[in-house]
Amino acid sequence: MSGPGGSAGPQRATASIPIRPLGRVVAITSGKGGVGKTFVAANLAAALARRGQRVLLLDAYLGLTNLDSALNLIQTSSLHDVFTGKADLGQAIIQAPGGFSVLLAGLGLLEHARLTPDVRDEFLRVIASLAPRYDLVLLDTGAGISDVVLFSVSLASVVLLVATPELSALSDAYATVKVLAGQQKRSRIHLVVNHTARLGDGRAIAAQLQQVLDRYVVSEPGQGIRLSHLADIPADAAARQAAVGRQLLWRTAPACPSALAVEQLACRLEETVLIAQA
Ligand SMILES: Nc1ncnc2c1ncn2[C@@H]1O[C@H](COP(=O)(O)OP(=O)(O)OP(=O)(O)O)[C@@H](O)[C@H]1O
Ligand SMILES: [Mg+2]
């Protein structure tokens, strides 16, 4: 992980420079890995599509993608091919079974897993040209605070931070919010608590995290950072089974508790994006 404030000049600096976020671009990120970002991103994309939104799900986990297997898609062209000029965006964007578009990262992106100036420029070019073509662009990012993750998050006007009730996921979520407040001057982060066991788990966790943030983190001088608790998604056997079968929930278990929670999240996200754009 490279530290904040990299060594290169202003054009070359990466995560430390706040890029102007693009409206309608939503980053789905987390402090700890494996907390359900891809699960949330893929099922949320399908839920938004069913609500009539034109959605692009972009695999921003350069290097270690698992979106292709979550969606049971066979890779043809990918972001990697776009970056290297082997394909154009029209060839690389494919349709997922849930009625949304997908741009997969591609295995070759291992060599792009570091945020070099070229990767940064290509990434920016691709997202800036795609964002106006969709109602919503969801970025399924990697976990943590690496340059690539922070850069992709910096492009989004809305950040969904996925955490679980596990202590390590919460402390990593805190660390991520702290960095986003400091480097990107974010004043609001949207929290999705996944794998909850009981009703009210998420609310309690959000309140606890907010307390710590109020005490230790400021974004702009004198301004705190606000966690907005968007949704709880229960730990659900149907979600696990859908993942094993590489299916989305609307297909295998549309009325299971996690599917209903994702539907609700889709509804709240629409409102949030509208407010962020106002
Ligand atoms: N609410 C849930 N109930 C049960 N299983 C879940 C739930 N959410 C996610 N999972 C399962 O947890 C596993 C990890 O989820 P996922 O791959 O989405 O995590 P991730 O945050 O994208 O991981 P990475 O950081 O590696 O990208 C998957 O098998 C997924 O189906
Ligand atoms: Mg993932």
Image: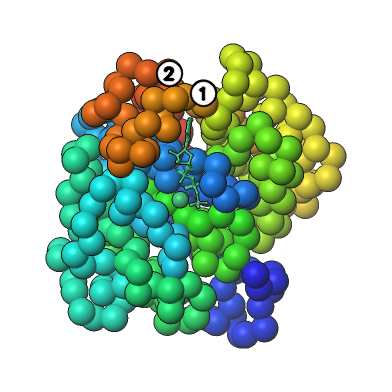
Mark 1, residues whose alpha carbon is within 10 Å: few (<14), some, or many (≥20)?
Answer: many
Front residue (pair 133, 194):
194
Give the percent coordinates (x, y) of residue 122: 36, 75
Measure the C-alpha gap from mark 2 to mark 1.
7 Å
Quadrant of the rendered image containing residue 98: top left
- Of residues 44 and 180, the one nearer the viewer is 44
135 relative to 2, above or below: above
Q: Residue furthest right?
A: 215
* Amino acid tagged 2: Pro
Label 1 is placed on what type of residue? Pro
Asked if 40 appears above or below 132 in the picture, the reply is above
Q: Between residues 276 and 95, which one lies in front from this camera angle?
A: 95
2 and 1 marks in contact (CB < 8 Å): yes
Question: Circle 2 sits on which residue?
Answer: 257
**Left or right: where 174 falls relative to 239:** right
Quarter placement of the C terminus: top left
Q: Is mark 1 within 8 Å of ligand 1?
A: yes
Q: Relative to 88, does residue 74 appear above or below in the rendering?
A: above
